[in-house]
Amino acid sequence: MVKSLMIQGTSSGAGKTILVTALCRIFSDLGYSVSPFKAQNMSNYAYSTKNFEISRAQAIQAIAARTEILPDQNPILLKPLGNYQSLVYTNGKLLKKMHANDYYKKFVMQTGLKLALQSFDRLQKTHDLVILEGAGSPAEINLVKYDISNMKIAEETDSPVILITDIERGGSFASLVGTMKLIEKKYQNLVKGFVFNKFRGDIEILKPGFRKLKKITNKPILGTIPLTKFSIPDEDSIGNSAKKLVWNKTNLRKLDLEIDKISYVVKSSLNISAIKRILK
């Protein structure tokens, strides 16, 4: 069995974080030891302890996976300060403040990728399955040289990729085709299928588009997730305002119920058997 699976999106806010959260719970329910992983995350919303600080999203995903929350699940956290400056955390500890130019041109390729891969390796040794989350879009061709959050990390970890797109925004078919056209051939081969997110209406309306999309890309559609209301805090302020989360027992119980809710919806909407075959 392949010990990793990666979820990437056609844009920020496509649904990567929630899909990873749901898959962590689904595969945990199936008896797998699962851990989330995101090489680099930009967010001012963090999970903090006395010993480390990582993105809140990966902490919630770890709860969904029923595994310990660890610094390795988000080895690089960027907290934006404005004016192209961010606080850079590595392995859960504050490293220093960096300008975007220094971060991308000096830190990412010299240190960042190596650090991320070391974290991934440690997680893979202690779990049956690591589910990786990408960042933004893998088709940002102006930044691809410095992108350690998407196809580069998928290639280095030999992780099959599922692309998710937000159909509520419109342009989902074009976004998927455009993404596949813009990424390199070797990365196209890593993509194993597509997921449509936030759909409302009659699924029959989409089927002619599904057939044409498969003909153009030769990739299957793995499912369509309906637009669903849930109370899992956002990763950041994109879209809805991010909700504060107090990590007490009462809120964690509520969070667990919401994770069960969204995982049920996702499990009912996706071809989980096909995803399991991707892992073989």
Image (cartoon, helix red, strand yellow):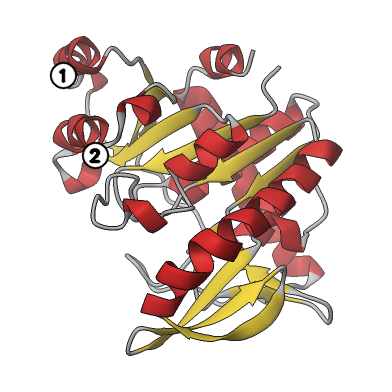
Spatial separation of the CA atoms under disc 2 and disc 1: 12 Å
Q: Residues within 10 Å of mark 2 (few under 14, many from 20)?
A: many
From the top left corner, tell me how far across and down residue 106 is, in percent.
48, 71
Relative vertical location of residue 197 with respect to residue 57 in this rendering, above or below: above
Query: Which secondary structure, mark 1?
Result: helix
User: Horizontal and vertical percent for residue 134?
Assistant: 47, 48
Residue 100 in percent (x, y) is at: 39, 77
Residue at the location (61% across, 36% down)? 157
Report the disc number at residue 60. none
State left or right for residue 95 relative to residue 105.
Answer: right
Q: Quadrant of the C terminus?
A: top right
Label 2: which residue? 167
The image quarter containing residue 220 is top left
Crowdedness near tag 1: few (<14), some (14–19) or many (≥20) residues, C-alpha within 10 Å: few
Asked if residue 223 shows in the view, the reply is no
Mark closest to the chain's N terminus, 2 or 1: 2
At horizontal 38% and vertical 30% (from top left) the residue drawn is 187
Q: Is residue 84 above or below residue 152?
A: below
Q: Number of callouts in the render?
A: 2
Nearer to me, 171 or 191: 191
At horizontal 24% and vertical 50% (from top left) the residue drawn is 141
For image coordinates 67% across by 22% down, the residue present is 2
* Residue 143 appears in view: yes
Q: Which quarter of the figure is the N terminus placed in?
A: top right
Q: Is residue 230 left or right of residue 165?
A: right
Q: Amino acid at mark 1?
A: Gly
The residue that label 1 is drawn on is: 209
